Image (cartoon, grey):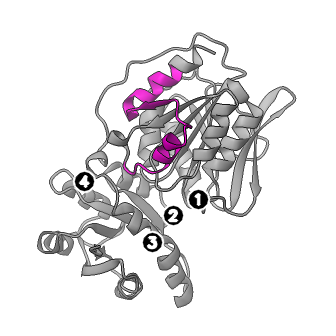
Amino acid sequence: MQPIKVLIVEDSIVFRELLVQNLSKDPEIQVVATARDPYEAREAIIKYDPDVMTLDVELPRMSGIEFLRKLMPQYPLRVVVISSLSDKVFDALNAGAVDFVAKPAVTSREQLENFIKNDLLVKVKVASKAQIGNLRKPVIEQTKQSLSVKAQDLIVAIGASTGGTEAICEVVKGFGTDLPGIVVVQHMPPGFTDMYAKRLDNQFPLKVKEAQTGDKVLPGTMLIAPGGDRHMRLIRANGEYQVECRHAPKVNGHCPSVEVLFDSVAKAAGRNAVGIILTGMGGDGAKGLLAMRRAGARTIGQDESTCVVYGMPKVAYDIGAVEYQEKLTDIAGRTYALLNKM
């Protein structure tokens, strides 16, 4: 197997060298070049044809986001963004980056090395498997649907990972405020989930927020599980749906985990739910979606042709958890159709 060719774009000499040293320790990785700014990066891309580029958002001469917007239409490339805690990372994902990692605010060399080994290295390997053709946003206009049933007792649950921030946006684009309450797990570092929720809240008619224990899951609202070390579960209390966000070990390598959310939806909502599993590496959420289907819920999986990484939906489909496999732009319509039959 050929190693993954990586281009590192980082203006800090110290951090750049740490990235080179630690990524190069992995036999599956070959760091073919480094660049201090987008102009050097462009030359390196032409010369070395990397499989994956790591890209700092803040760069001299041109921002990483501007560089992505200029680069991706002409030279699509798998990109992992390295970002401090800023909502600029979502502009980078919108511009075509596969995924991102949060730049650690640490001074210890050991902590930095752990970040590279446990976070960045994993993202680079996942990005190397991304389908480049699906990095650009769909441009198909969705037909607006409407709900003809009472939304109060119904639930929509969504799980996603790599490529999911943009996939969720595309699904929500077809949702109106008449929809039942929506609960979401998107694998993301702490801090970024709150910014992502606020971004969606400003962009769409739905009321979107980062979830907290005790939040009610009401029609026309979307609750996004907080990134970090808490799992989000759906519960039924006093005749209403609520969420609990509690500290717990990782499940399937993730916290929050889609598996945990879907399992709780199966128990709390049963046949009154629709489960949706979107793009992402691995199998988190597949068994939970199967539990939902066995409890009578309706289930949807994103199809391979529109996934950035056809991992989670594939595992779910292979074990029989997916009732309907749909293109990304058709998921909202299918969701309304299933809810209208409840």
> Left of 181 or right of it: where is 2?
left
The label on residue 85 is: 2
Q: Which residues are magenta?
A: 308-336
Q: Which residue sits at x=24%, y=74%?
A: 37
Distance from label 4 to label 2 (Cα)? 21 Å
Residue 102, how many percent across, how many down? 49, 67
Q: Are marks 1 and 2 in contact (CB under 8 Å)?
A: yes
What amino acid is labelled 3 in the image? Leu
Question: Which of pointers 1 and 4 lies earlier in the amino acid sequence?
Answer: 4
Q: Residue furthest front?
A: 319
Q: Which residue sits at x=41%, y=48%?
A: 310
> Left of 1 or right of it: where is 193?
right
Question: Which of pointers 1 and 2 lies earlier in the amino acid sequence?
Answer: 2
The label on residue 191 is: 1
Foreground residue, 321 or 171?
A: 321
What amino acid is labelled 2 in the image? Leu
Residue that carries the numbered disc 4 in the rendered image: 69
Residue that carries the numbered disc 3 in the rendered image: 120
Q: Secondary structure at mark 2?
A: loop
> Left of 5 or right of it: where is 264?
right
Is 173 magenta? The answer is no
